[in-house]
């Protein structure tokens, strides 16, 4: 039977064939994990009854007494701590210090994790609802308990108990959660033709390959979502809770084209949620990843015209070019934008932005900085970007950096001694960074900064942003070429761990490899200028402009 199965799927697209083959073990693993969790919950419930019903009854004490509650919570807390301390793998990583998207837990740590889970559940109660509203995650909990009075229902050892909570003021109500969400993150169900994660090199941290598409992360952390994971009741919840703004990866408002671009049959259907959110008073930020010859040109005009009908609740629209690496095996054949095609995108975006400015008093439509660099056009003035609503998409980031950097230089500073260091940057930002360092030296001649432009060979393709530079490339391109014993690296190169590059090399290891002291420079222009102005021993005065 399996022979026929594998023979039949051999005719499919390589990517589809791989996914189909992997679906069998994925289903089996999912079933096994579910059964293990069910057993763990049953064991926890049994132990909970012993601790909160049978044991106090035998000892002749009330399970509701403060002393018993304190004793049980303390005892189970100690028991969980001992399990974590002495079990192999220490029951996995600490959720309080783990990044949002963490690496898989080591197999050896699973028994300890399971024991800690059972003890933790047995030692406490299970919160069921607030004001008869089911609790699915931390958003539900925070929303329904943000009141001076509410009805609380929980499952305890001797059954279901209910309380009427009265308190003098609103605010957080006494429960902490092990994760940001209180449950698992929603993974992406799309296979977008432009997905950057599908183009990552092999051998990186496992967490980097996780694709999230979770509306809660949009609200909490500014992530962009496609809405293909969402159902009507989730849209209703967003409107009811007024979770605003929501960041949505639109890409195109052509339903058929969106299905094709996302490789998800719901890609076009869920576009109906956009007007529902807007009508419900939810502000929306939109992202368009443009693929040359696919959703630009007339399709881009259609998308912008459709989105403008939803203003002013659609409060910003950004377009970015598809990122292309050297690892696009068996993926849609993307063609990079050149100067001519980039200029065409800019012209369309600015045309619609100008019209929006006339109609609504605000531009809201912005090309990312990369388009201007590719087209060989100057970055627009600060007024163009208004409130800088799309900085995370690289819209106006270079202009804001320059404005803040120069503004800081114009302030009076006392400089103690001299300072000389090397700094690294990506190809896109290199002209700007070089110009800023030259201006810094002109105004403060005692400070010299040597700029090194790092070509992204790790990812290859058209990747030129500073945030994707790896330590591997820095080492390869800077070894033996640094002028000083201090190397400044932008903080944007470091990921969630704050001291580790994308290729899993730490700041300390980078310094050891190059034989230098590594100084992490802030990302914002003003903050970076202040960091570079900090130095040594004797006072020198700032050189006046024009001198």
Image: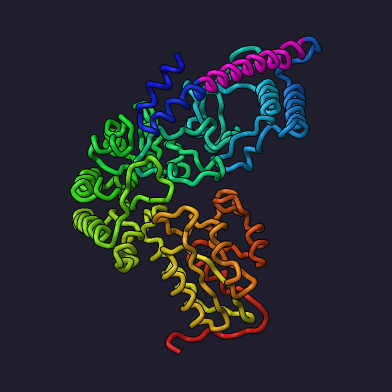
Q: From this view, report whether residue 12 is shown above or below residue 399.
A: above
Image location of residue 64, percent across then percent down: 70, 18
Seen from the viewer's position, the closer of residues 320 and 407 is 320
Rendered residue at 64%/81% (across/down) = 417
Q: From this view, report whether residue 386 is shown above or below residue 67.
A: below
Seen from the viewer's position, the closer of residues 420 and 127 is 420
Rendered residue at 62%/34% (across/down) = 105
Indicate whether residue 451 is drawn in magenta. no
- Work out which quarter of the rendered image holds the C terminus and state it: bottom left
Q: Is residue 87 visible?
A: yes
Magenta segment range? Answer: 28-57
Quarter location, residue 403: bottom left
Image location of residue 155, percent across then percent down: 60, 17
Outermost residue, bottom direction? 547
Indicate whether residue 44 is drawn in magenta. yes
Is 113 on the left or on the right of 333, as rendered?
A: right
């Amino acid at each position: 039977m399996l022979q026929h199965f594998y023979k039949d799927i051999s005719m499919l697209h390589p990517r589809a064939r791989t996914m189909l083959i992997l679906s069998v073990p994925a289903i089996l693993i999912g079933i096994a994990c579910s059964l293990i969790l069910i057993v763990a919950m049953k064991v926890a419930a049994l132990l909970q009854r012993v601790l909160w019903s049978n044991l106090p009854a035998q000892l002749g004490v009330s399970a509701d007494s403060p002393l018993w509650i304190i004793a049980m919570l303390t005892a189970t807390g100690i028991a969980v701590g001992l399990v974590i301390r002495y079990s192999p793998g220490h029951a996995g990583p600490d959720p309080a210090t783990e990044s949002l998207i963490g690496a898989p837990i080591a197999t050896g740590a699973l028994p300890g994790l399971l024991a800690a889970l059972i003890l933790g559940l047995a030692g406490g109660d299970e919160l069921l609802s607030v004001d008869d509203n089911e609790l699915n995650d931390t958003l539900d909990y925070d929303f329904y308990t943000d009141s001076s009075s509410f009805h609380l229902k929980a499952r305890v050892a001797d059954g279901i108990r209910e309380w009427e909570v009265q308190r003098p003021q609103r605010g957080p109500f006494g429960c902490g959660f092990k994760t940001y969400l209180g449950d698992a993150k929603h993974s992406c169900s799309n296979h977008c033709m432009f997905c950057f994660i599908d183009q990552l090199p092999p051998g990186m941290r496992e967490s980097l390959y996780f694709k999230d598409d979770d509306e809660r992360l949009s609200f909490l952390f500014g992530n962009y979502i496609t809405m293909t994971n969402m159902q009507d009741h989730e849209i209703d919840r967003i409107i009811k809770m007024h979770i605003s703004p929501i960041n949505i990866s639109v890409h195109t408002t052509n339903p058929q084209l969106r299905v094709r671009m996302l490789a998800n049959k719901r890609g076009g259907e869920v576009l109906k949620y956009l007007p529902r959110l807007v009508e419900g008073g939810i502000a929306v930020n939109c992202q368009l990843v443009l693929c040359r010859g696919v959703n630009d040109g007339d399709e881009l005009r259609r998308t912008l015209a459709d989105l403008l009908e939803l203003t002013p609740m659609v409060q910003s629209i950004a377009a970015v070019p598809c990122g292309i690496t050297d690892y696009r095996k068996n993926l849609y054949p993307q063609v990079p934008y050149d100067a001519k095609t980039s200029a065409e995108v800019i012209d369309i975006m600015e045309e619609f932005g100008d019209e929006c400015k006339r109609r609504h008093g605000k531009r809201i439509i912005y090309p990312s900085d990369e388009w201007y660099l590719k087209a060989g056009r100057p970055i627009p003035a600060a007024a163009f970007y208004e409130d800088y609503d799309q900085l995370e998409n690289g819209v106006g980031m270079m202009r804001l950096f320059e404005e803040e950097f120069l503004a800081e230089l114009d302030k009076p500073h006392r400089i103690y001694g001299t300072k000389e260091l090397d700094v690294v940057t990506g190809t896109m930002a290199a002209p700007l960074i070089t110009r800023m360092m030259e201006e810094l030296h002109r105004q403060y001649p005692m400070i010299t900064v040597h700029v090194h432009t790092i070509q992204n060979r790790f990812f290859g393709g058209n990747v030129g942003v500073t945030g994707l530079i790896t330590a591997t490339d820095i080492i390869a391109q800077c070894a033996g070429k640094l002028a000083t014993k201090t190397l400044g690296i932008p903080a944007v190169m470091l990921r969630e761990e704050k001291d580790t590059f994308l290729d899993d090399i730490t700041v300390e290891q980078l310094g050891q490899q190059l034989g230098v002291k590594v100084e992490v420079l802030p990302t914002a222009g003003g903050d970076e200028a202040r960091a570079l102005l900090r130095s040594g021993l004797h006072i020198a005065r700032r050189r006046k402009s024009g001198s």
